[in-house]
Amino acid sequence: MSKIKKITCIGAGYVGGPTMSVIAQKNPDIDITVVDLNQARIAAWNDENLENLPVYEPGLDAVVREARGRNLFFSTDVNKAIAEADMIFISVNTPTKTYGKGKGQAADLKYIELCARQIAEVATSDKIVVEKSTLPVRTAEALKSILDHTGNGVNFHILSNPEFLAEGTAITDLHNPDRVLIGGESAEAIEALVQVYEAWVPRERILTTNLWSSELSKLVANAFLAQRVSSINAISELCEVTGANVEEVSKAIGQDSRIGSKFLKASVGFGGSCFQKDILNLVYIARSYNLREVADYWEQVILLNDHQKTRFAEKIIQTMYNTVNGKHVGFLGWAFKKDTNDTRESAAIYVADHLLAEEANVVVYDPKVTAEQIYKDLDYLGTRSPEDNRRLVRVVNDPYEALSGAHAAAVLTEWDEFKTYDWTRIKEDMKRPSFVFDGRKLLNRLELETLGFAYYAIGE
Ligand code: NAD
Ligand code: UDX
């Protein structure tokens, strides 16, 4: 197989955009076109002003500045890009199904299937089709069947190349990955993709496996990471009743090199578009093979995470004399973690929903999330009318305004800037007693208590 010259990526989202930008940056001799049905998203990727890129990631603007217009292009002409490419990445969304069989658990593969059908219809030359989206194990089989049965006598090779980047650190993760995983059946196709990554990733970090190991490894990696967060969050509740301190426990166990120190930070609960979706999918797959104990085991990671979000909201209510009705709770943060504008499955959404059910007045400040997105997240839950969400929730652009006159401050995201605020000024502007509920263990207890705050943190 000759060297790849043209790559197309279907899906210009949080994965497709940054991943292709870095591949283009590191392979100036390969032309890369990222396509999407969403015109507004493509327009934003093409915006002259790099502050308007649709994805906020530290360092992404510099990579786009370097490659865009040189060998990196964003377009809505999906057919043209498919027809011209030697290699096509599918990086579309694979959300949890909201209807029919597997509702609430299985991955919805309709977008993937649409891509396969479109590739089959349009292609007139041989292609390597790369699964970049996270998919249930054995999806490649279905893709191959669609491509082979509706194609025009064209040869397709399917590879699985799951993405392991984390949001907020996507560019450093892409520049310096722990590993790149490529699963496939054709040694030639695998080698063609290896060469793309070899432009900057050392060969020993590029792992090649069979298709099914690659597909399954992605789900398992996310399940293990999420499981660590749920494990330490379970211990955080035990710390709160025993007088142990979860940070000290994390440090003590994390120094054991067999356990390791990462992903042991207790929090208000994990969010993001991946962990919950991928574990639910793993649970669904295990159930579909009648592996009940396996399914129940992994499901517990989600149940504990739901418990942690509820527990945090309950703690706020209980501490504020069992009622938050009409009380002003200032939210610091809405994104599911720092350094991203992504709010999918963010714990903040569920904590807010719980407080709003008690008729609290929530005032939100997040450095990167828009008011429009915050209302959209709340409306999507369908718990109350859009009018009620707008009556009870206010979104502001200034953190001091979010907390001025507040009965309580709640830290939902670990943005660094929250640590640098003038907490003396905040204390003066808040009602007394002035509560701080720190869902990220971000702030300094001693400093806040000295200022007169009543400070509550997860796991203490
Ligand atoms: P996203 O929703 O941000 O982007 C997906 C894009 O695909 C959307 O812009 C959508 O318009 C487009 N799309 C859908 N169907 C299309 C079609 N038929 N033709 C053209 N465009 C189409 O999703 P994402 O966060 O980038 O995730 C994509 C995949 O990568 C998912 O499977 C996800 O599980 C996986 N993943 C995500 C992350 C992450 O951090 N977000 C990390 C690793 C893996
Ligand atoms: C995750 C995986 O890390 C990444 O490899 C995969 O490709 C996509 O899913 P992401 O969801 O972007 O990445 O961010 P991650 O850093 O994993 O954080 C997920 C959630 O867990 C966040 O809400 C974060 O705040 C929370 N978390 C993480 C904790 O609460 N404690 C920790 O110790 C680590």
Image (cartoon, rainbow, N blue to C red):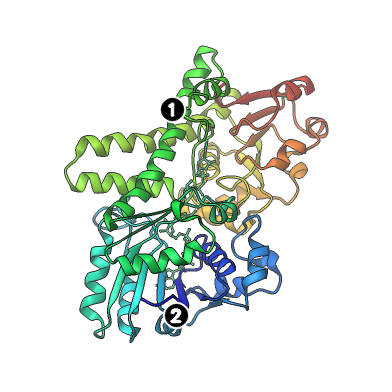
Q: Residue furthest top?
A: 242
Q: In the image, 417: left or right of 351?
A: right
Q: Nearer the viewer, residue 385 or 59?
A: 59
| Residue at 51%, 40% in the rendered image | 357
Please tell me the numbered disc located at residue 183.
Answer: none
Kindly identify the amino acid type of the residue bearing the numbered disc 2: Val
Where 167 falls versus 53 (above or below)? above
Q: Position of residue 11 (x, y in %)?
A: 46, 68
- At label 2, counting other C-alpha atoms closer than 10 Å, the crowd grade (few under 14, some 14-19, many 20 or more) is many
Relative to 419, is 150 on the left or the right?
left
Query: SS at mark 2?
Result: helix
Residue at the location (27% across, 55% down)? 212
Q: Could you tell me if residue 165 is visible in this image?
A: yes
Figure label count = 2
Marks 2 and 1 sit apart, C-alpha to C-alpha, by 47 Å
User: In the image, is the residue at mark 2 within 8 Å of ligand 1 by its beta carbon?
Assistant: yes
- Which quadrant of the rendered structure holds the C terminus? top right
Q: Nearer the viewer, residue 345 or 14?
A: 14
Q: Nearer the viewer, residue 132 or 24?
A: 24
Residue with the mark numbered 2: 78
Residue 55 location, x and y as percent? 59, 61
Q: Closer to the camera, 337 or 102?
A: 337
Visible in this render: residue 405?
no
Q: Amino acid at mark 1?
A: Arg
The answer to which of marks 2 and 1 sits earlier in the sequence is 2
Q: Residue 163, relative to residue 69: is it above or below?
A: above
Disc 1 packing (10 Å; few <14; some 14–19; many ≥20): few
* Disc 1 target residue: 258
Rendered location of residue 259, percent (x, y): 45, 28
The residue located at (53%, 20%) in the rendering is 252
